Amino acid sequence: MQGTVVRGVANRFGPVQILRYSVFGLGIALWLFLLPRESWQLYLVVPFMALFQGLTSPNSTALVSQSGSEQSQGRTLGINQSVLSAAFVFPPSLRLT
């Protein structure tokens, strides 16, 4: 589902237009994770998270790629990937116990 929707939306709209709505949708999807009272209810929330994350991630990378010149594109994408990796690594290590 995610690949079909993302591909269809990407063919019709540009990254800026997609991000304008997908970031908002991703924020709502994250908020929806607070609502389920039982574990089975997460199955109702996860598809929204997957959809909006699938729209947000590649389009934000596309904008980063377009922001640099051809000579600095590799460096720009490398820095972007390093920041994304750090964002996934550091929060679990800072867990509150």
Image (tube, grey):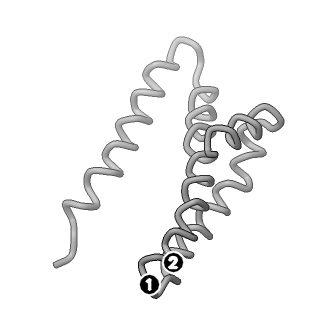
Q: In this view, does 92 lie to the left or right of 71?
A: left
Element under label 2?
helix
Between 83 and 88, the one lying in front of the other is 88
State left or right for residue 1 relative to residue 91: right
Q: Which amino acid does label 2 sit on?
A: Gln
Left/right placement of residue 70 relative to residue 6 reads: left
Rendered image: mark on residue 41: 2
Task: Report which quarter residue 26 is drawn in.
Answer: bottom right
Check the picture and name the quadrant holding the C terminus. Answer: bottom left
Residue at 58 percent of width and 27 percent of height: 65
Residue to which mark 1 is pinned: 38
Circles 1 and 2, Cβ within 8 Å, touching? The answer is: yes
Q: Give the percent coordinates (x, y) of residue 38.
A: 44, 84
Q: Quadrant of residue 92?
A: bottom left
**Residue lying at the far top of the rendered structure:** 71
Pinpoint residue 42: horizontal percent, then vertical percent.
49, 72
